[in-house]
């Protein structure tokens, strides 16, 4: 099984549940770098009683903090909005399947969501070709 280093571009630590007790977890602390996605929105329609609630469509217009380094042995943990807004970065992963406490607050995640293996392999092959070599 391929093992990679995780670098978090999140604001808060990411807790991954490893099975067993909830205390059995891997905690990935923020790297100090943060990815930010600036969004714009358009009103799709108005809804609700009196049609006072706007239903909007949000879309990314700018991304900041995207790492330049592409390394087949590194995966960047990013918020879901960044994962979806920058689909060409196949080295991005995002927390998935939250585990909530009795108070409803997310305590940990079961997995990291990533891209399809074939897409990831193609991404790194292209990145290495652009660099003119392999790692």
Image (cartoon, grey):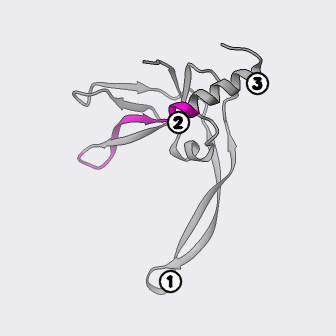
Indicate which disc residue 51 carries. 1
Which of 49/116 is in front?
A: 116
Q: Residue 53: give x, y in percent of width and height.
A: 50, 76
Which of 74/31 is in front?
A: 74
- What's the CA distance linking mark 3 and mark 1? 52 Å
Indicate which disc residue 130 carries. 3
Q: Is residue 49 above or below residue 37?
A: below
Q: Is residue 50 above or below residue 33?
A: below
Inspect this view and state whether residue 69 appears.
no
Inspect this view and state whether residue 31 appears.
yes
Q: Quadrant of residue 108?
A: top left
Q: Residue 119: give x, y in percent of width and height.
A: 57, 34
Q: Give whichever of discs 3 and 2 has the lower sequence position.
A: 2
Q: Quadrant of the C terminus?
A: top right
Task: State the residue at coordinates (66%, 35%).
Answer: 66
Q: Is residue 83 shown in magenta?
A: no
For the residue labelled by badge 1, is the local secondary structure a helix, a strand or a loop? helix
């Amino acid at each position: 099984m391929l093992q990679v280093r995780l670098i978090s571009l999140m604001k808060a630590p990411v807790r991954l549940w490893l099975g067993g007790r909830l205390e059995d977890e891997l905690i990935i602390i923020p790297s100090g770098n943060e990815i930010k996605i600036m969004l714009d929105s358009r009103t799709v329609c108005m809804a609700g009683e009196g049609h006072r609630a706007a239903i909007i469509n949000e879309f990314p217009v700018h991304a900041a903090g995207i790492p330049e380094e592409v390394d087949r042995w590194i995966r960047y943990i990013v918020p879901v909005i960044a994962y979806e807004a920058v689909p060409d970065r196949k080295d991005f992963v995002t927390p998935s399947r939250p585990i909530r406490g009795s108070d409803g607050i997310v305590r940990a995640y079961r997995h990291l969501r990533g891209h399809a293996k074939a897409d990831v392999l193609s991404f790194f092959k292209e990145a290495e070709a652009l660099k003119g070599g392999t790692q």
